[in-house]
Amino acid sequence: MSKATWLNVGGRADVLFKPCDIEDLTYLIKNTELPVSVIGATSNIIVRDSGIRGITVKLGKEFAYIKSKGNNSIVAGGAVLLRNLAYFAGEQQISGLEFLVGIPGTVGGGIEMNAGAYGSDIASVVQSIKAVNLEDGNLYKFSSEEMGYFYRGHSLKGNWIFVEAEFKGVNSEYELILQRLKEIVEKKNKSQPIRGKTAGCIFKIQKTAEHGS
């Protein structure tokens, strides 16, 4: 896994599976008794030297599609890089997704952890989500409200792989969106070692502080 992870560390996976489509993925889950793990861009995980047992699922190029639905809405596959989604939205003159340009991850991973930056998060722009349950192998669709999002997480019970999501922004001028994207990238370049092998932020922002006596 050292050649397939963000930090270039980790032992071998027993099986690395890249499904061709949703049907391929659901068939695997319904017909295996092996444990199934899911990885995305792996920017927030460290794979142990002993590797990963069972089947490791990674969505590939077949899930890296982005398309406009009109009415300032975008549909993106789970393997789409968040920065690519931000730039695509800009090209469509859709504002509100600019914060994603500085987050090293995929749509699927971003949905799982409610990724966010600069005062915005996935929950504020996602409309609906398609996910495959890792226990029964079935495909489900959830609204943003059904996800029960909170800071850097969601309330959905069970284990899931998020295969597609619909996002919605607001119409704006391309030049204004591009300027905002440039500002975020420049700020990231100045404040964080984005080209280094780093897992990014380690601690969550705490809304309130508790002090012991």
Image (cartoon, grey):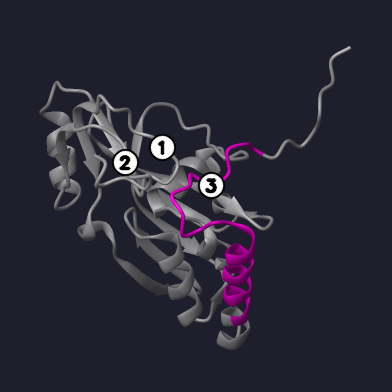
Does any portion of residue 108 appear in the rendered image? yes
Q: Quadrant of the C terminus?
A: top right
Q: How far is disc 2 from disc 1 in space, using C-alphas? A: 9 Å
Image location of residue 152, percent across then percent down = 57, 40
Tell me which numbered mark, 2 or 3, is placed earlier along the sequence: 2
Left or right of residue 37: residue 178: right
Q: Residue at x 39, y 73 (%)?
A: 68
Is there CB contact under 8 Å for labels 2 and 1?
Answer: yes
Q: Secondary structure at mark 3?
A: loop
Does any portion of residue 132 appear in the rendered image? no
Given this view, does label 2 or label 3 mark the residue nearer the observer?
3
**Residue 211 falls inside the magenta stretch:** no
Tell me which numbered mark, 2 or 1, is placed earlier along the sequence: 2
| Disc number placed over residue 39 in the picture, else none | 2
In the rendered image, which quarter is residue 51 located in?
Answer: top left
Q: Residue at x 64, y 67 (%)?
A: 187
Asked if 52 appears above or below 112 in the picture, the reply is: above
Image location of residue 209, percent across then percent down = 81, 29
Mark 3, residue position: 200
Is there CB contact under 8 Å for labels 2 and 3?
Answer: no
Callout 2: few (<14), some (14-19), or many (20+) C-alpha neighbours within 10 Å? some
**Magenta-drawn segment:** 179-204
| Disc number placed over residue 45 in the picture, else none | 1
Amino acid type for the residue under numbered disc 1: Ile
In the rendered image, which quarter is residue 180 located in?
Answer: bottom right
Amino acid type for the residue under numbered disc 3: Gly
Q: Quadrant of the N terminus?
A: top left
Image location of residue 84, percent across then percent down = 41, 68
Tell me which numbered mark, 1 or 3, is placed earlier along the sequence: 1
Which residue is at the front of the view, 191 or 135?
191
